Image: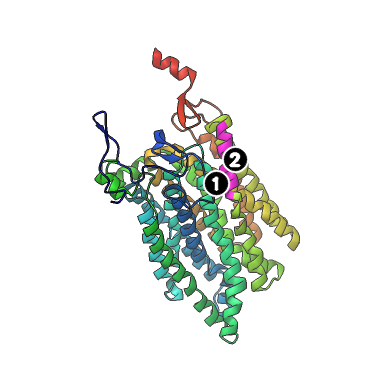
Amino acid sequence: MSETDKPTIVEAGEPVEWKQYSTYSIKTDPDQDDKATEIKLCSFARPHMRAFHCSWWCFFIAFFIWFAIAPLLSEIRDDIGITKQDVWTSSIVGVGGTILMRFIMGPMCDKYGARISLDSVVRFYSYGIATGLAVLRLFIGVAGSTFVPCQYWSSRMFSKEVVGTANALCGGWGNLGGGVTQLVMGSALFPLFKIFFDGDSEMAWRTVCVIPAIIAMASGIIVYRISDDAPKGNYVDMKKHGTMPEVSAAASFRSGALNLNTWVLFVQYACCFGVELTMNNAAALYFKDEFGQSTESAAAIASIFGWMNLFARGLGGFTSDKANAKMGMRGRLWVQTIFLALEGALVLVFAQTGSLVGAIVVMIFFSLNVQAAEGATYGIVPYVDPASTGSISGIVGAGGNTGAVCFGLGFRQLSYEKAFNIMGYSILASAFMSALINIKGHASMFWGKDEIIEKGILAVPMPEAEEEIEA
């Protein structure tokens, strides 16, 4: 008899709530829907850590495909005779193609769960990458929407005590695909395929893009079969047994979209993740055009930006969680502000750096703060409106792509220096928008106080709240 088919146990005349798993291999909080209160990175046990690893892996593959063509853009530009504007148009289409999908994926996660949402998108973009070059970047732009179920899934599995770290690690390790693809596609597979095709670069870059598609299709099928939507099981089973109610996707989206905090985070995410997407498209071109590097070496240097995701985004989420433990929501907001301010300042420095070594060093610290700000953002998102976390994740995530489109237009029309300056000042302005965030039940940056504090696994009323309850 399977876990799902086990009969409901009755104690003291009351049926025990249905669960797929009677025990967990990780500490959980029953008051937070059996979400995990710790993270065991070396564990692959269901449901929590299995979902964690499936989540970041799908996003990693999405990122790998999304920017597989970026390190090859200089070769494509020269082979088929397109202009700088044409190159940046394709890059803008690539990051812009996912904006609408991110808005859609949020409510879909609230209704159907992250597992099915991820599987459907992964399989879709695996078809898209094998199409002709003219529609390639538009199709694979859909891959970026996997970020929404990625963050929703980790928020669904981990409690508020560690959700910032969990979200940041899943997002960061997924974003790592942007660095890995620069190195693998630009510095390894492309020269290898050129050898196979006797130096024919056009055949090489066209053919090499098929490999990620195969990996994506296999990943989608496997993840769907080996993972769970939530700690208590899959959504379809939970609804069948009355463990969770039916969710209206439209109502979820409406609730998230009418919250001012959602749109402040939308802008701030545009100024961190939007910057990362822009750099994934711009970095290899920048180091080749401005410092005379070869395609292979420019791709290797550009990959450093993405490789920082190995720890930088996790650092942002971890710092946000620690600040929350000390100062509540005010701590999370200050962490977000500081990372964004440092990011903006370093962009301005990067634009003025004339030496190759200096530019690489500044880019490393610039990248660290970009990704830490991303992690800090999604340390805040689960608090905005827990019932609409999927929709809010989708809207805020769409902000990242919107920022990439806006900054991409700058690089398309302006010199590198002017485009970087506009980017830097925009980020600095967004940092101070944290003062506008005012989440119900939590302190803002300069006023109010948290109505609850979290100790261990329970939400404990503050003394003032207890007095009001007694009164």
Q: Which mark is residue 319?
A: 2
Where is mark 1, residue-wise? 375
Give percent across and percent down for residue 271: 55, 49
**Residue beneath the point at 65% across and 72% down:** 296
Q: Main secondary structure of the magenta part?
A: helix
Does the segment drawn in magenta span residue 324? yes
Residue in the foreground of this view, choosing between 298 and 57: 57
* Residue 248 in sight: no
Are circles 2 and 1 on residues that touch, CB within 8 Å?
yes
- Residue lying at the far top in this picture: please name it: 471
Give percent across and percent down for residue 464: 48, 17
Examine the rendered structure and indicate whether residue 13 appears above or below residue 466: below
Does the segment drawn in magenta span residue 424? no
Give percent across and percent down for residue 13: 23, 29
**Residue beneath the point at 52% across and 56% down:** 174
Please provide the residue range marked out in magenta: 313-325
